[in-house]
Image (cartoon, rainbow, N blue to C red):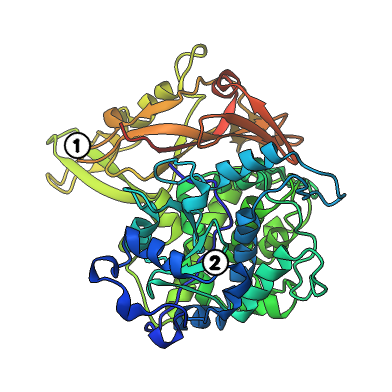
Amino acid sequence: MYSDKTVPKSVNGTTKSNHDNHSPHINHSNIPESISDHNLNNLKFIRDLTPQPDNYSTIHSCSHINSVLESKAKNTVFETYKQAVLISQPLDKEYTSRKDGSLIPKNEILASKMTSLKCTDCDLNNFENSMICLQCPHVGCCFNDHNHSYLHFKTTKHMFSIDSSTGLLYCFKCGNFTNHPALEKIRMQIIDKNYKDIDALSYAGYTDPPTRATTKGLKGFVNLGATCFMSSILQTLIHNPIIKYQMFNNDLHFFNCERNHNQLIQNGFIVEDNACITCSIDNIFQVFYTSNTLDGFGMTNLLTTSWYKKKSLAGFQEQDAHEFWQFLLNEFHSDYNRILAQLGESKEPSNCSCLTHSTFSFELQSCIRCGSCNSITETVDPMFDVSLEINRLKKTTNIDLYDCLDLFTQEESLDGMYTCKKCDSNSKATKTLKLKTVPPVVSIQLKRFEHNIMNDTSSKIETPVKIPLFLDLTKYSVEFEGVRFYELFGVIVHIGSVNTGHYIAFIKDGNGQWYKFDDSVVSLVDQEEVTNSKAYLLYYITHKI
């Protein structure tokens, strides 16, 4: 299950701990050995010894936070820290947060705060004893038997967390609270509403705290001129928990992409030399999960970058959503290899760890049976999606997705004569396709568009195909160990004709609720509308039983 918590972004420090930078108010030699290993009591012990709010500025920085704030990630750290401090602020009867000065009832703020600070792992609503990870969406409980905040550090090596009750930054590597003049300035700007230098760090406009809907990414895209094919595909990425996790933990790209750095220097202006799809998508993820508004987002950065990367996308003509999805996957892989080459590293194609391969890659096994000697020749091809026929089905009504999969994997006769390498004869042969491996996310295209070569015309197939909410691929797979059960979470539908169509997306959130994304309009729908839709693209994610 994924988390819909506060602003995530990758941050890391590589230098060794500098214990001379610890708070002068804490004598580390007096900490009992039993609580010195970052365990449950250690954090509480240090919090109890930490200066009260008016003395927080006396806490020194550590080498780890210094290293991060000297890197390209500093602006993201500042923004992440600000959002966490906003959430950590105590509530009072006069609490004001709307930009127009109107008051929000305390119980509404409290409910939002409890949702935002619920433990990712155990759903504990104990927001005064929670730690907000600075490097990903994780919120972990502490001061209890679970202590998921510390377990998160041990499993992910994310060293920085923000104390939800104080807004202070805790470094798990040092085992101590840490601070920095720049972070303290942000904290004081939030605490003191009359602080004169409120715009000094260019954080104007962030006075409304993120709502539950915004932290769940429930935002649409402004149509910039026949860009619905892009919007629909982006929604399937934004709400894919595996991709979301990878985007918010993409240290390799975030810390090493010079194009991202060059964009910052040029005030976000995109030119061909600094165009990077991964950076553009990363920017969209940040906006969708940290914004304090549900207004539609204008993807001008991605649009410009896409035009530079693929000339056929330039302009405002309607494009095929499936082709755009393939384009993005190719770019993710290309960006990953570019960074590796920049660092002097390389990966074998069969062992690629890029977002594309780690999420969508699988192997398709083709078995050709010789009609003379009955021998079987196997070949294996890498794939990222499955394209299923609709028109070739014998029945025309009551069709479901399994009918299409049956057709895809059934034995069929090859055209022409087959030269067998075993018996060296030319004979008839049959071919069968099976999934040799399965990916974490299965992407399926239903072939609804056909092109007639004879008269050079295109047509659309409107045949309904019933879509299962859960998909069992056991029947279509080679015998192997692994999960073959999947849960539907994304559907893209093409409405209209070949030349004047429109794309929408249906997305299921982490709570099982379905939403329809029609450009900038987001609305609730029931699952029957989804399963009965004339789907074009389907996205299934691993479902563990």
- Identify the mark nearer the N-term, 2 or 1: 2
Mark 2 nearby-residue class (10 Å; few <14, some 14–19, many ≥20): many
The label nearer to you, 2 versus 1, is 2
- In the picture shown, does residue 396 fall above or below 332? above
**Pointer 1 local density, CA inside 10 Å: few below 14, some 14–19, many at least 20:** few
Residue at 38%, 75% in the rendered image? 174
- Residue drawn at 50 percent across, 37 percent down: 510
Is residue 25 shown above or below 4?
below
**What element does badge 2 sit on?**
loop
**Closer to us: 33 or 393:** 33
Q: Is residue 352 visible?
A: no
Q: Give the residue type at disc 1.
A: Glu
Percent position of residue 220, x then y: 71, 43
Q: What residue is shown with label 1?
A: 479
Name the image quarter holding the C terminus. top left
User: Along the horizontal axis of the image, is 392 left or right of 54?
Assistant: left
Q: CA gap, disc 2 to disc 1?
A: 52 Å
The N terminus, quarter of image: top left
Task: Name the one closer to the observer, 297 or 129.
Answer: 129
Determine if residue 419 is in view: yes
Q: Which mark is residue 168?
A: 2
> Could you tell me residue 185's position as x and y percent?
68, 75
In the current view of this chain or complex, which residue is farthest to the right?
100
The image shows residue 201 at horizontal and vertical percentages of 74, 74
Q: Are marks 2 and 1 in contact (CB under 8 Å)?
A: no
Q: Quadrant of residue 449?
A: top right
Give me the residue at 81% from left, 44% from top: 103
**274 sits left or right of 27 in the view:** right
Task: Indicate left or right for 17 with 101 as reference.
Answer: left
Front one among 266 and 361: 266
Query: Residue 99 at x, y = what percent?
Result: 83, 52
Task: Work out whether residue 250 or residue 442 is closer to the camera in this orientation and state it.
Answer: 250
